[in-house]
Amino acid sequence: MSSNIVITIARQFGSGGHEIGRRLSKRLNIPMYDKELITHAAEESGLSEEVLHYFDEKPTNSLLYSLSTGAYSMGAGGAVNYSMPVNQQVFQAQFDAIRSVAQKSSCVIVGRCADYVLEKHEGLVSIFVHADLGDRMERVAEYDHITLPEAKNRIAKSDKRRASYYNFYSGKKWGVAGTYDLCINTSTVGYDNAVELIAKFVEMKQAQSK
């Protein structure tokens, strides 16, 4: 695999991981992929974007996660493996899309087990973004126009879903410091400082590898 710098960002819900990825992309002048990976996966696999969105970062106990009929996953190209459950088809499609964008150029990738998928990539820098629960509740409540108790419930469900998805496919522990190169608390440093920390860390890691 190429030595492009690929920064993967795993994140607690409401911690600002997506926004940090966006700002980091601008700071380093490299593309960022989040939901865009679904389009790439659909184009390369033949699975429909609707199905990819439905199963995106879903845990293994999702109601339809064990579906094995190809009727729900047929895309324009018809590239469906009928012997593989839909959830496995979706993960494989995203796996391939992640590797594809990492080979093309340096980039930032948010979520979707990207650090696991690219663990043998020489230029990988894996980040975990977290924040204090109160701050996350306020951000989610403001962004989604819901109450703080509703935000707390949404955070708990989203974090559980992300952890289940990551732990199942990677065999690692989501959110545990030893899983990542760098963990950042946005409640402590804020978004802009988080971006600068990551950029500096990338610079130091590149220098160390020379």
Image (cartoon, helix red, strand yellow):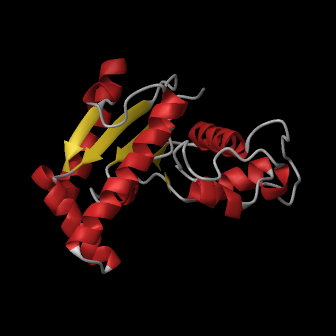
Quarter placement of the C terminus:
top left
Left or right, 76 with respect to 158, comes to right
Q: Position of residue 112 (x, y in %)?
A: 51, 45
The answer to whether residue 97 is visible is yes
Q: Position of residue 7 (x, y in %)?
A: 41, 40
Q: Residue at x 75, y 55 (%)?
A: 43
Q: Position of residue 166 (x, y in %)?
A: 46, 37
Q: Give the residue furthest to the right.
A: 78
Q: Position of residue 194 (x, y in %)?
A: 22, 50
Left or right, 87 with respect to 58, comes to right
* Image quadrant in which you'd find residue 140: bottom left
Q: Residue at x 42, y 26 (%)?
A: 172
Q: Residue at x 38, y 44 (%)?
A: 10
Above or below for 76 versus 209: below
The answer to whether residue 24 is visible is no
Q: Give the residue furthest to the bottom.
A: 145
Front residue of 121/68: it is: 68
Front residue of 101/95: it is: 95
Q: Residue at x 43, y 46 (%)?
A: 162
